[in-house]
Image (spheres, rainbow, N blue to C red):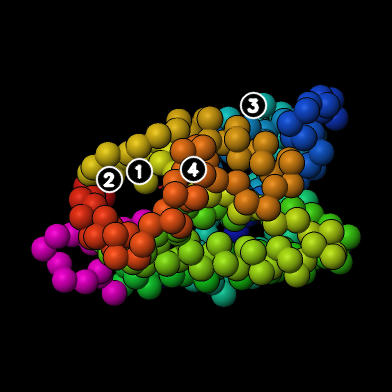
Amino acid sequence: MKNFPGDALFCLDGKGKNVSSEASGRDILRSVLITGATGGIGAELASYYATPGRTLILWGRNAQRLTQLATECCAKGAVVHTRQVDLCDGAAALAAFEEDDATHKPDCVVLGAGLSDIQSLEDRTEDPQKVLQLGLVNYATPVTLATAAAKSMAERNGGHIALIGSVAGFYEMPFSAAYSSSKSGLAFFAKAAGLAWQQYGVKLTLIVPGFVDTPMSQRLEGPRPFLVPAKKAARVIVRAIARGQREYIFPWPFRVLRVVERLLPQKLREYILLRLAVGQKER
Ligand SMILES: NC(=O)c1ccc[n+]([C@@H]2O[C@H](COP(=O)([O-])OP(=O)(O)OC[C@H]3O[C@@H](n4cnc5c(N)ncnc54)[C@H](OP(=O)(O)O)[C@@H]3O)[C@@H](O)[C@H]2O)c1
């Protein structure tokens, strides 16, 4: 587990304050912090949020990708700070967040970094090391950072936090128990914390994607029903955040499935889950 200290600044000047007033609500936010900015969804979110007069604080591990993304967002007029952080080290991530929060006071924090893993057919269990990483990156660190953000936002009379879950969190998937349970835990946290924080003006949105066309889902061997392009995913995520939705499941067939699967008898549900054939390509 390695953490990369430091904060790189890419643009000194946000090129004026000519933020257009768009129905999407993109113009309201002055400062946005995104974890997993180097990923498929995160990069599109960063690009979407990059406008003149706005500061972006982009977190990821891949230095080259961070630099490339920062350059693109600067070209769109945003002031960009990047930080290399390994979210497996929750304590270091919290310290980094407190530093960025004190400097930039983000009014929106999007916790989008995530890891997935599928148990191979030859193995009897998941790899315990990967299970630990999944628990840290998908659950422990994001809920810690969300809490730190909420604490600070409550003192500033408000803000918005978005957590990226997954429809996998709705199902007890035998071939990826760690991933589905990490997302299920995140969803439960979002419900409880959202209730607790609303009185302080802190909004919490849980984004629940189905399949999005990014490196994460491209590794899967098997069908990706109702696949959504990453750019479109970013657009609907930004819209859900702007509307202050508590939970946003997309694309819509997964909202229908959510209703249908609740009607299934448990035995039938388990029968289907045990027969799902999903594999993954090696990284
Ligand atoms: N794609 C889908 O079909 C899908 C469906 C449902 C939910 N989601 C969720 O959506 C979110 C974004 O996923 P994506 O599809 O954009 O995946 P992705 O392209 O694989 O990107 C994952 C991001 O998480 C970061 N990350 C992974 N491990 C990290 C660690 N230890 N420390 C810091 N950052 C780490 C990666 O950083 P580096 O690349 O810099 O290492 C990258 O920015 C995830 O939470 C995922 O679970 C995705």
Whichever of callouts 4 and 2 sits on the residue coming sooner in the sequence is 2
Mark 3 vs mark 1, foreground winner is: 1
Q: Tell me which residue sits at (51%, 68%) in the image.
A: 185
Q: Earlier in the sequence, mark 1 or mark 4?
A: 1
Q: Amino acid at mark 2?
A: Leu
Observer able to see residue 261: yes
> Which residue was labeled with disc 4?
256
Name the quadrant containing residue 243: top right
Dot 2: what SS?
strand
Are the two marked residues, 2 and 1, in contact with CB atoms closer than 8 angstroms? yes
Identify the residue under disc 3: 75
- Helix, strand, or loop for circle 4? helix
Q: Which mark is residue 220?
A: 2
- Front disc: 4 or 3: 4
Residue 52 at x, y = what percent? Answer: 76, 30
Taking 265 as reference, is 278 above or below it? above
User: Residue 117 magenta-drawn?
Assistant: yes
Q: Is mark 2 within 8 Å of ligand 1?
A: no
Q: Residues within 10 Å of mark 4 (few under 14, many from 20)?
A: few
165 within the magenta span = no
**Is the residue marked 1 within 8 Å of ligand 1, measured from its CB?**
yes
Residue drawn at the location 32% of the way across and 59% of the way down: 269
